[in-house]
Amino acid sequence: MTGGPHHIPVNVITGFLGSGKTSLLQRLLNSEAFADTAVLINEFGEVGLDHHLLEEVDENTLLLQSGCICCTIRGDLKDAIRDLYSRRERGEIPAFRRLVIETTGLADPAPILSTITSETVIHRHFRLGNVIATVDAVNALLHLRRQPESVKQIAVADRIVLTKTDLAKPGAIKKAKEAIGRINPMVPMIEGANGPIDPFLLLAQDVHDESHKLREIELWLAASRHDEDDGHETPHRHDVNRHDKRIAAFALTFDKPMDWTAFGIWLTMLLQSRGEDVLRVKGILNVIGVATPVVIHGVQHVVHTPVHMKDWPDDDRRSRIVFIVRDIAKAEIADSLSAFNAVARDLDREEDAA
């Protein structure tokens, strides 16, 4: 499980080679809202920070005009994060309240997310925030056809920044958005070529952010309404334009409240057996004996700590779960979860009768 709202959030900026990660990071570094943020990047030279430089703390660390701390990743990521936190605690660098990691263009973000949540020392102080993926609007379809990494980067993203829209034809932008939506139907897309980008939308609004978690859940539910059913597979038209036919996104809804223990066992078994292929799980659950909804959120083997909402976002009290999976049939997930729920209800009835 990932940490709670009082841990330091870690945002990951990912995206394929040439998709504009560096340009996005430069724009964010100019924002005053970025002043209490630390950034881990591969090489300073790739980011072009010279005009931002205020002070060189040491050979690996720069303090920028905005107040942001930038450090190079030397060797293992977990060592870089632990070292950064130790220096923060010793007062050697400003007390940052957010960490941003820029990945390489060929990186699968899943191991990075796993490092943040599974390494003991890091997990004690940090939690996952948003995953931001940059997508080149000019070359999006080409990358999605040829590069499986780009498909996975989109699938695990919480935000998409569509870059080079000033260079792309309107038809290409439309096709890129459609392709992204087929892979990850719940992700907000931001056109990043023109105008300012709100750093709070990218970095501060996630399900653990008290002031924005309701809005985040509403985004998930809006996506799920396009594909709601009663927990059983419905036919889907074959999509000849799909760029990775192995990846599917779908939503399941359940009318009856769920047994939390049964759901936890089911999800644990699913992730243990097929975690590499369960790219995303997001949902809002009606749990037996709990008056308000419980929010679940997972990326592959990584599962965030469940969030208990203060109230339901609307009058719909059904459990609604959105999945992005690879090589797993919708019916397989729906039927197994329904079976677990049915067994739990039978056991509850036997206990009540006893």
Image (spheres, grey):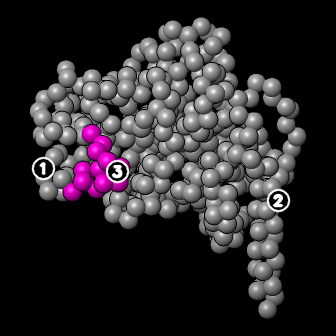
Q: Secondary structure at mark 3?
A: loop
Q: Nearer the viewer, residue 78 or 303?
A: 78
Q: Is residue 80 magenta?
A: yes
**Residue 122 showing in the rendered view:** yes
- Badge 3: how crowded within 10 Å, few (<14), some, or many (20+)? few
Residue kind at label 1, given as amino acid type? Glu
**Residue 212 showing in the rendered view:** no
Residue tagged 1: 92
Q: Residue at x 42, y 41 (%)?
A: 12
The Cα–Cα distance between marks 3 and 1, rounded to whole angstroms, is 21 Å
Residue kind at label 2, given as amino acid type? Asp
Return the mark for residue 230.
none
Q: Secondary structure at mark 1?
A: loop
Tell me the magenta residue range: 72-86
User: Farthest residue toward the right?
Assistant: 235
Sequence-first tag of 1 and 2: 1
Q: Tell me if residue 168 comes above or below residue 249 in the rendering.
A: above
Residue kind at label 3, given as amino acid type? Asp
Residue tagged 3: 76
Sequence-first tag of 3 and 1: 3
